[in-house]
Image (cartoon, rainbow, N blue to C red):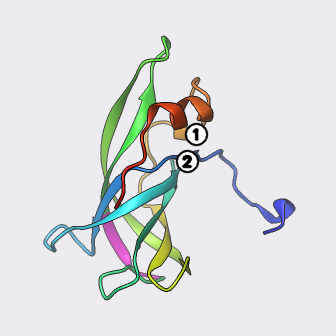
């Protein structure tokens, strides 16, 4: 993708942590793996099967985001957000990448915290979905 065509207005935090999603809170949750997040949306991967979200679908997602303190400490802030699936890309024949826009933004900008992104990558150990 051409760097100049990127319309993002906010830096994203890249990290690999579980995310749970369903069409609504009454359905069974399916696990995916977070790829990146900003205050207005997130991207995650999931298996390319019947339960994978599709463009235009509304889903509910439960996930955690690292929140950094002034002393380089952090804790995981837990969120539940309803969102709109704006895009689904095939990563390969087994995995899809899903982009979701939240109906309500997070109370902070995860990618623009005081701690650097490399610090987050060092601190957060990848978790397989």
Q: Residue at x 36, y 80 (%)?
A: 52
- In the image, residue 94 lies at what x, y percent? 44, 82
* Residue at the limit of the structure toward the top, as seen here: 71
Residue tagged by mark 2? 14
Residue 58 in which image quadrant: bottom left
Q: Which mark is residue 111?
A: 1
Q: Residue at x 51, y 71 (%)?
A: 97
Q: Residue at x 53, y 74 (%)?
A: 86
Q: Nearer the viewer, mark 1 or mark 2?
A: 2
User: Image height check: is 94 above or below 104?
Assistant: below
Residue 109 appearing in the image: no
Q: Badge 1: how crowded within 10 Å, few (<14), some, or many (20+)?
A: many
User: Image height check: is 118 above or below 19?
Assistant: above
CB under 8 Å between discs 1 and 2: yes
- In the image, residue 59 lies at what x, y percent? 33, 71
User: Image height check: is 81 above or below 10?
Assistant: below
Residue 30 in which image quadrant: bottom left
Q: Which residues are magenta?
A: 56-60
Residue 125 appearing in the image: yes
Report the magenta stretch's main SS: strand
Helix or strand or loop: what does disc 2 sit on?
A: strand
């Amino acid at each position: 993708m051409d760097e100049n065509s990127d319309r993002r207005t906010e830096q994203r935090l890249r990290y690999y942590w579980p995310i749970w999603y369903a069409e609504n809170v009454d359905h069974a949750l399916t696990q995916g793996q977070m790829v990146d997040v900003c205050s207005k949306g997130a991207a995650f991967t999931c298996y390319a099967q019947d339960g994978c979200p599709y463009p235009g679908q509304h889903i509910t997602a439960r996930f955690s985001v690292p929140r950094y303190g002034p002393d380089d400490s952090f804790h995981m802030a837990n969120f539940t957000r309803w969102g709109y699936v704006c895009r689904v890309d095939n990563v390969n024949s087994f995995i899809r990448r899903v982009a979701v826009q939240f109906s309500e933004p997070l109370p902070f900008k995860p990618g623009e915290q005081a701690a650097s992104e490399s610090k987050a990558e060092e601190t957060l150990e990848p978790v397989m979905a």
